[in-house]
Image (cartoon, rainbow, N blue to C red):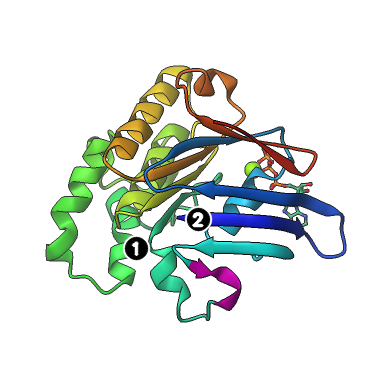
Amino acid sequence: MIRFENVGLRYDMGPEVLRDLTFEIRRQSFQFLTGPSGAGKTSLLRMLFLALRPTRGLITVLGRDVATLSRKDLPSIRRRIGVVFQDFRLLDHMTTYENVALPLRVRGKEEREYRQDVVDLIKWVGLGERLNALPIVLSGGEKQRAAIARALIDQPDVLLADEPTGNVDAPLARRLLRLFLELNRSGTAVVIATHDLGLMEQVDARRLVLADGRLEIYD
Ligand SMILES: Nc1ncnc2c1ncn2[C@@H]1O[C@H](COP(=O)(O)OP(=O)(O)OP(=O)(O)O)[C@@H](O)[C@H]1O
Ligand SMILES: [Mg+2]
């Protein structure tokens, strides 16, 4: 579904932070992306969802060479990719419901078509009681779950989550992991960037490990 071939990335005139990355994210697969702080996990995720172009190499997403995509092709491909950001990026003036519904609203869908789906998904992540709360009153873990729901509302083919358990305690981390596994069983590919060893030890999943700019894969 997403393929990297000899991809390299540098910021401005700096050194290459990622080098010679060759790997594939297959349909319906589940994997962790790990490595120490500063190893390039977030940078790699940003290339995966087309927010950042590589400085060299080839990235193909859903069969399309990313370098040849025009601006107008981007939204339809991006829609297939759900992202949970390390810092959530919820809109402060919108409730949980409105934040989660936003991707559909932006796409011009009518509220009566999606209202129930949004409510059901918010309940699925355990935020049924926080439907009308603004982000400012949500705890870190609640914001995390709101961000997860927003990433999933448009039924992406792949979910990319950047440190999705970075702000929660161990029991909630396990619950979120179960949520991701359930999502994966229903057919969504999942990539979880984390340095939480305890989390990774709970499932026997593929690991993409970044160190010194290179990637090692443990299937
Ligand atoms: N916008 C940017 N401009 C310049 N350098 C950057 C930029 N973003 C990241 N970097 C550098 O690229 C390297 C990888 O950063 P990145 O944020 O991808 O790491 P990470 O693995 O996600 O770290 P963390 O675990 O702390 O989130 C770091 O050396 C960082 O300083
Ligand atoms: Mg990061």
| Residue 116 x/y as whole percent | 14, 52
Q: Kindly identify which numbered label has been placed on residue 103.
A: 1
Q: Quadrant of the N terminus?
A: bottom left
Residue at the spot 64% in from the left edge and 64% down from the top edge: 58
67 part of magenta stretch? yes
* Range of magenta residues: 64-68
Q: Tell me if mark 1 has few (under 14), some (14-19) or many (20+) residues whose alpha carbon lies within 10 angstroms of its own.
A: some
Residue at the spot 77% in from the left edge and 51% down from the top edge: 19
| Residue 219 x/y as whole percent | 54, 31
Q: Kindly identify which numbered label has been placed on residue 175.
A: none
Residue at the spot 59% in from the left edge and 62% down from the top edge: 59
Q: Nearer the viewer, residue 160 or 113?
A: 160
184 displayed left or right of 117:
right
| Residue 146 x/y as whole percent | 37, 44
Q: Earlier in the sequence, mark 2 or mark 1?
A: 2
Q: Kindly identify which numbered label has been placed on residue 2.
A: 2
